[in-house]
Amino acid sequence: MIYVPCLRWKLGEYQAISKLSPSTKDSIIPLIEVAEIGYDFENKKVSKTLDEHLISFAKRVKEKWGRKGCFIDIQLIEPYGLMSSGYHPARFIFEDLRLKNICAIPVICLNMDPQVLDEFINIVDIDKKGLCIRVNVEEIVKGNFSISIGNLINKFGLRCDQCDLIIDLQTPNFEPLDRFANLLVNIIKNIPNLNYWRTLVIIGTSFPPTLGGLKTGISTLPRSEWCLYEQLFNNLKKDGVRVPVFGDYAINHPEVLLLDMRLVKPNASIRYSINNEWLIVKGVNVRDYGFSQYGKLCKLIIEMVEYCGPEFSAGDQYIDACANGEASTGNLTTWRWVGTNHHIEKVVRDLAIPFAF
């Protein structure tokens, strides 16, 4: 089965994806969100121009992911306006991706500004790779959803089988899980042209926006989106209904937090995905106590029965090496790629084992 991880294209995420095993790369279609521009709190302005921010995007996609298929979503940079050339950023990004022979499928939302929509119509017409539409549950349950999405596809001159549909739950209230699963089953059954979409995906996460509420040491958090998917898979299979592809936000929360790092003291932490849960190993703040504490945090992980072993992934290998003093204790970005890399490998392996239904 294919897996769609939604990744904000920052250093930790693209390092994680570049270190995946070849078989895992063949089993995923990443939903790549062009990351927001950082903010310079000291000078009270964005840290880069839009041109500076986007100039290396396609190059990094080629270097870190290659020419395999991927979804590209620009929603996080839309508020920043036009390039210095007058180009809309979508036009610049997809022209650059095209020049590098990257199989990039544009992602749009249901109620896109007409001028931006025209940019994407032109991109789709040139690339002939189809289109991905990302919708939320509130949009799907509206009485006019079938008409709205039909009109949107018609504007591109496409059919459903040339389009991908992503149902983005974002961060819902998953409880009670049974009731939520039943609600989604009914929603999925009523999606127009359900069996004709090129790809049907459901993504969401229960990962919290911060780990501030967790104590130091070892904690666990439920991977509610994974438990939900198991129920969806079983219920839809039983009823002979198309099962969406699984997607999530890896080890991230979808909300964009612009933090003034001069005022923040982030704690050391390792996010390690296990069956139905995240294992969180948390230290103290790195500003006062440094990164050397990661050696001890890694030792806690490798001593646990849930540890998958150094051969499992590049991330697991790094954890083992750090625990044994054979690798640097790194920085916060290091532990983002380590956790993300392990998570993606874990999900792909778990999806290869059919759920019992």
Image: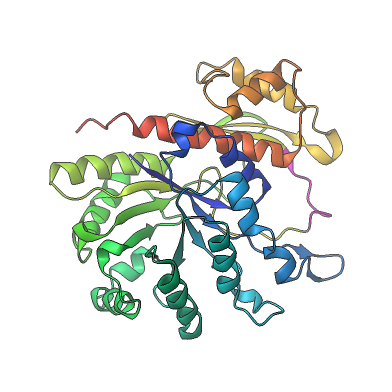
Q: Position of residue 328 (x, y in %)?
A: 77, 27
Q: Is residue 64 left or right of residue 223?
A: right
Q: Position of residue 230 (x, y in %)?
A: 30, 39
- Whether 109 is drawn above or below 297: the answer is below
Residue 122 picture quarter: bottom left
Residue 277 seen anywhere in this rendered image of the structure: no
Residue at 65%, 19% (x, y): give it: 320
Q: Is residue 342 left or right of residue 149?
A: right
Find out whether residue 281 is within the magenta segment. Answer: no
Residue at 46%, 85% (x, y): give it: 114
Q: Nearer the viewer, residue 124 or 329?
A: 124
Residue at 59%, 39% (x, y): give it: 18
Residue at 30%, 63% (x, y): give it: 162
Q: Position of residue 329 (x, y in %)?
A: 76, 28
- The quadrant of the image that shows the N terminus is top left
Q: Which residues are magenta?
A: 260-267
